[in-house]
Structures are given as C-alpha cells and as structure tokens.
Image (tube, helix red, strand yellow):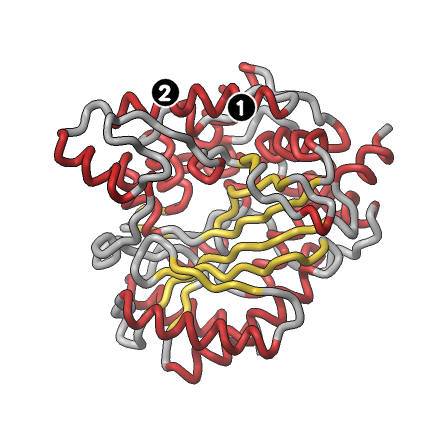
Amino acid sequence: MRRELQQSVIQRNTRVSLERELALFKPDSRPLNRTESAEFMATLQTRLGSQVERKTEVVEEVAPNAVEIKICLSTVGELREDVRRVYAVLAEVANECGVYVLGCSQPTTDGITHDTTHFMTLDVFKATIGPLAATNSLHLHFGGATDEELVAIYNAGNRIAPIMLAASQCAVIDGRERGRANSVRDFFSSLPPALAAPWTISNREDFENGVRSAIKAVEMQIGAFSPEYLAVLASRYPDFIGADGRMKKLSPDKIFHPTRLRFDKVLPELGLVGSAEFRPIDAQPTLSRDLAILELAIGLLIHETAYNPAPLSREEIGQIMHSMANVADFGMGAIMWNGLSNEYVAKVRAMEALMGIGLTPQSLHTFGIDGGASELAIMSSLSPADIIRINHARFMKSVE
C-alpha cells in the first residue's frame, strides 16, 4: 500500500516548480527602491533566459526590494541541478550590478513597508503588509494529474507544515528570533480563519465549498470600509470586487493555507489538472542549506502522503494551526503531536523516502537539522547591516 501511494502521488518525474524569494540591497545596506529592483530583475531575467535550459521567471514581491525567482516545469529529480544553475546566474548578475542578495528574511521592516506592491489581500487586510514585506521563503508547486493526487498532497503538506516551519527557521526580524515564524503567526492572526486554516477536503467540491465560505469572510471585512475606500478597491480589482462590496470570485492564490490547492494552475499539455503549493519553508542563507531544506520537505511529503492521504480532521486542523503559532516561541518544541518532532527522525524518514523514488539525499547527509539554532546563534548577535553583509557573502561563497 505504501509503495503504491508513493508512486501515484509524488515520484521522481513529478512536475515541480520552485519559487524563491530574495531581498536586494546596496552595499551600504540600503534596500533597493522599486525602480532599482525592476532594473535588476530585467537583467536577471535576460541572463536566465540565455543560460538556463528550463523556463524561469523573475517577478516583484511585496516589498519594493523583494523579488521572486520561479523555476518552472522541472521534475523532482531535476530540481536540485536547476536550483544550482539559477543561483549561479543570480550570483553572477548580483556581482555585476553591485547588489547584495539576502537569501534569509529581511532583518528589519524599516524602509520596506512603503511603496509595497498592490495585492488584493494587502489592501483588504492591511495588517498583513508588515509580515509579508519582511519575509523571504521557498514555495514548491507539485503538479497533479488528478484531483485525488492534488488533494492527497494538500492534506499531507498541511500535516507536515509545522515541522517544516520549525526546522527551517533562521531569520531574526526586528529583533525577534525565529522571525519568519513570528511573521507567519502575525499574518494568520490578521486573516479570517476561513482564509488561513486548512479545510477538510476530499474532492474538488469540498474545495469549492471552502472558497464560498472564504468569500463570505472577505465580504464581511469589505463591509466595514468607507464608501470611498470601497470604490478604490472596486476600481483596483474589478474582476474580484463589485461596487456594492460583493465578491465576484476568489482565486486560489488569495487563500493562504500552509499548503494550498491551485486548481487554477492547469497545464493540459503536460496532463496536469492543477498543483498543490507547499509554503511553510523559511528561506535559507546559502545554496547548500536551501537544497537540504528542499530535500527534507520533499522527502517528508512523500513519506506522509504514503502513510496518510486522508482528509484533515477538525482536531488535526486545530493542532496544525496551534503548532504553527507556537513555533515562534518554542521552535521544534512546538511540534509534539505528529510523530516527526524529533529532528533526527524527520531527517531519516525524509532520506528513506527520497531513496524510495531513486534520489540520493545529497545535502541532507551533511546539513544539520536543528530548528535553525545554528543560524539564529549567528544572526541574533548581529546588527541588521551585518546580517545583510555577512549573509550576502555567505550566499555568494556557497554558489562558487
């Protein structure tokens, strides 16, 4: 039974897309403004197009100095080498442009919560701007050939979300250790539960029912706005918000579960009906650490999907959200309910699962999974300027 589920849900040739968020600075630690970031993005996109075989995209993120690199249409077996190639080009362009690249989350929100990109979620739930602007992370989209495959990954991904958030913590933001976990807690508390907590899903109909409940929650928030601001929202997002404050639709990217379903990511030419987007990974400061965290996430997803693709119960959902919030205070100590809270056990299970689909877990053999303790020990004693400078140097050295 376990072998069959591994082969049918995530295997070596499963299509996967990676999204890698980064922050950009001048050598004096000044964050790039929107125009400077756009120039860097254009140069990077051109260079990636000429030097990397598979399709890549470079897009702006929430903060004016934040960008996202997308590695599209790799397979699980190809992803590590694609990441290496993309990071090498990134380092090359950063060096030529005199730009510092920060792989981990930004150490301060000072100067980066102004001139943010307009997204509907930010404009409707304004308290989300700070938590989103400062954080860099890794997202994985796993393609699925059937609704059943996507739902299985969704359920498994949400189950392992707390341990991946805890295991990957390395950020200090505004003096708060485990900075991204703090930001995740702040972000989720700024949203209605219908948009933040996973749903009990067995099929696409269950998902659509969840979307309808989320729409009602957004409409309640919009109903509190002044007519003037409602007119701004209706003008800015005409496909989503009517002049009367009613939601016309809510696309899957506006729902922020730790792992979310993306039935809008359809690729019929590859036989994919959508993707499941795995989100709870704190970005790491070096290539080797990124690769190790990716191996851990993919390995645990394979392992957990094999054991239990069943829908999440209400009790599990409560445990997941409780643990996600407590990671900010307790790190790995918050993960006591799912059998994977021991770092060694999680690492071993991930390696076993990777080898089960024919992949050698290269980076996990040498990377210490310690809940980010070693990184936090380095960064908690540094000023924001030093965090930027030192981690840029570490990133550049890691891709040599």
Given the image, on which type of amino acid does mark 1 rest?
Glu
Q: For mark 2, what is the residue?
A: 216
According to the picture, the residue beneath numbered tag 1 turns out to be 208
* Horizontal arrangement in the rendering, residue 315 relative to residue 308 (left or right): left
Q: Residue at x 43, y 84 (%)?
A: 96
Indicate whether 195 appears above or below 53.
Answer: above
- Residue shown at 61% from the left, 53% from the top: 17
Q: Quadrant of residue 250?
A: top left
Measured as percent of width and height from the top left, residue 359 is found at: 79, 54
Count of numbered badges drawn on the protein: 2
Whether residue 350 is visible to the viewer of this picture, yes or no, is yes
Tell whether 169 sits left or right of 156. left
Q: Say what amino acid the circle numbered 2 marks.
A: Lys
**Category of crowding for the residue at label 1, using alpha-carbon neighbours closer than 10 angstroms: few (below 14), some (14–19), many (at least 20):** few
Dot 1 falls on a residue whose secondary structure is helix
Residue 79 picture quarter: bottom right
Q: Vertical placement of 59 versus 265: above or below? A: below
The quadrant in which the C terminus is found is: bottom right
Q: Position of residue 315 (x, y in %)?
A: 55, 15
Against 251, residue 41 (above or below) is below
Secondary structure under tag 2 reads helix
Q: Percent position (x, y) of residue 363?
A: 68, 59
Disc 2 residue crowd, few under 14, some 14–19, many 20+, Cα 10 Å: some
State the residue at coordinates (43%, 19%): 213
N-terminal label among 1 and 2: 1
Q: Position of residue 212 (x, y in %)?
A: 45, 21
Q: Is residue 161 left or right of residue 250?
A: right
Work out which quarter of the rendered image holds the N terminus and state it: top right
Q: CA distance from mark 1 to mark 2?
A: 13 Å
